[in-house]
Amino acid sequence: MKEKIIKESILLFEKKGFSETSIQDIVEAIGATKGTFYYYFTSKEQLLMEIHLGYIDDLLERQAAIYKTEANNQQKLRQMLELLIADIKDHGPSGRVFFREMRHLAEENAGAVKAKREEFRVNIENLLIQGMEEGEFRKDIKPDMIAFAVLGVTNWSYQWFNPAGKVSAESLAEIYSDLILNGIAG
């Protein structure tokens, strides 16, 4: 039942927004009572926090699995880009709620989520540094800025990318990989 509440809440938060979705909306959507909701969550904000932590923890776990592979740094960066773009196809509503609704978390909760987001970014930065040290990436890049750029292009894609459209998630990940790894110079 807890997972049912979370899944339906993600869809409602994506459609109506966190503020416009009431606990009554959630329980009506799952055919339960408010008592059922409060059995699993003390508040709507606690539910939102669980959605956020579940989302970022899953991304961090999958990023760590990529980092541990025997692939070279360029391949790992490509895989991380694929992870982020494929996630739009596989978990689009969760991602949109994650990026759009964090402002509704209490300061302490938002801080915990931001720390995990920062961990994800630093992991990309460290991968870039390692690639620079191993000669896979230019020595004159700014790894912190490139990590922000990687997250900027991929995270903004949640706003406009339609995985069922004319460009597949795999193709978009390849386009971004080519852009980041090769630039656009002639």
Image: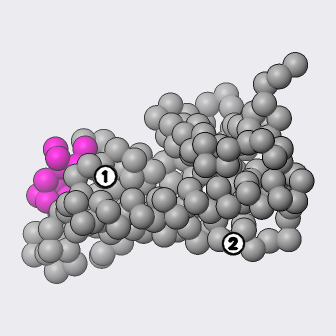
Please determine whether, in this image, residue 48 is positioned above or below residue 160. below
Tell me which residue sits at (22%, 52%) in the image.
104
Q: Nearer the viewer, residue 25 or 84?
A: 84
Camera sees residue 145: yes
Mark 2 highlights which residue? 65
The span picked out in magenta is 17-28
Query: Crowding near pointer 1: few (<14 within 10 Å), some, many (20+)?
Result: some
Give the x, y percent position of residue 170: 73, 44
Query: Crowding near pointer 2: few (<14 within 10 Å), some, many (20+)?
Result: few
Most extreme residue toward the bottom, as rendered?
Answer: 39
Residue 182 sits inside the magenta stretch: no
Tell me which residue sits at (83%, 44%) in the image.
138
Most extreme residue toward the top, as rendered?
Answer: 186
Earlier sequence position, callout 1 versus callout 2: 2
Tell me which residue sits at (52%, 64%) in the image.
119
Tell me which residue sits at (73%, 54%) in the image.
128
Q: Nearer the viewer, residue 16 or 153?
A: 153
Question: Could you give the CA–CA distance between mark 1 and mark 2, rounded to whole angstroms?
Answer: 26 Å
Which disc number belongs to residue 102?
A: 1
Please determine whether, in this image, residue 134 is positioned above or below residue 85. below
Give the x, y percent position of residue 40: 22, 78
- Amino acid of disc 1: Met
Give the x, y percent position of residue 1: 30, 76
